[in-house]
Amino acid sequence: MKNGTSPCEGQVQMNISGGWKALCASHWTIANAHVVCRQLGCGFATSTPRGPYFVEGSDPIWKARFHCSGAESFLWNCPVTALGVPDCAHKNTASVICSGKREEGADWYSGCSVWKKSPRAENEGKWLQKLNIS
C-alpha cells in the first residue's frame, strides 16, 4: 500500500510485470479490501475510502475488477475481469484502511526482492499469465 500512515493503510497497488500499478476503485468492495488486509497480515478492512484519500498522482492504473468473496487469503485467489473502462482517474483508485498492525513475520505480497525469491512468486506469475497481463 502507498502513502498511508502505517503499512496497514493506503492506496492499493500491485506489482505487475515489474512495475507498480494502482488499482481502479470502480467496483472495489469491502470484500476485496478484507482480502488485501488479510494478505498483509493487517487484520480486516475497516473502510475503503473514496477519492484521492491517500494519494492523487501519476502512477499507472490497472483497470481490473476483482470478485473476492472476502474469504480468500490472497488477492490473486480472487476471480478478476477487465473493466473495459476507457479511463480510470487517479482520484478513483482503490484505498484500504485495515484494523490492525502488520503481524511480525507475516508472509505478504509486495513485489520486493525478498518476495520474488519466495515460492509464491511462481504462482503469482502463473496467475498474471492467465489474465494475459504482460
Image (cartoon, rainbow, N blue to C red):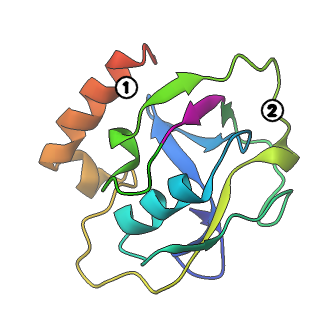
Could you tell me the amino acid type at mark 1?
Answer: Leu
Left or right: residue 118 versus residue 108 is left
Q: Which mark is residue 128?
A: 1
Element type where label 1 sits in the image = helix
In what quadrant of the picture does the N terminus appear? bottom right
Within-10-Å neighbours for mark 1: few <14, some 14–19, many 20+ = some
Residue at image coords 26%, 53%: 115
- State how far apart marks 1 and 2 are (Cα): 21 Å
Q: Please provide the residue range marked out in magenta.
A: 63-67
Q: Nearer the viewer, residue 93 or 115?
A: 93
Q: Which mark is residue 88?
A: 2
Q: Nearer the viewer, residue 30 or 16?
A: 30
Q: Are marks 1 and 2 in contact (CB under 8 Å)?
A: no
Q: Nearer the viewer, residue 82 or 55?
A: 82
Q: Is residue 59 above or below residue 110?
A: above
Element type where label 2 sits in the image = loop
**Percent position (x, y) of residue 80?**
48, 29
Q: Is residue 116 above or below residue 61?
A: below
**Percent position (x, y) of residue 28?**
65, 47
Residue at image coords 81%, 59%: 50
In terms of secondary structure, what is the magenta stretch mainly? strand
**Percent position (x, y) of residue 76?**
36, 40
**Percent position (x, y) of residue 65?**
59, 33
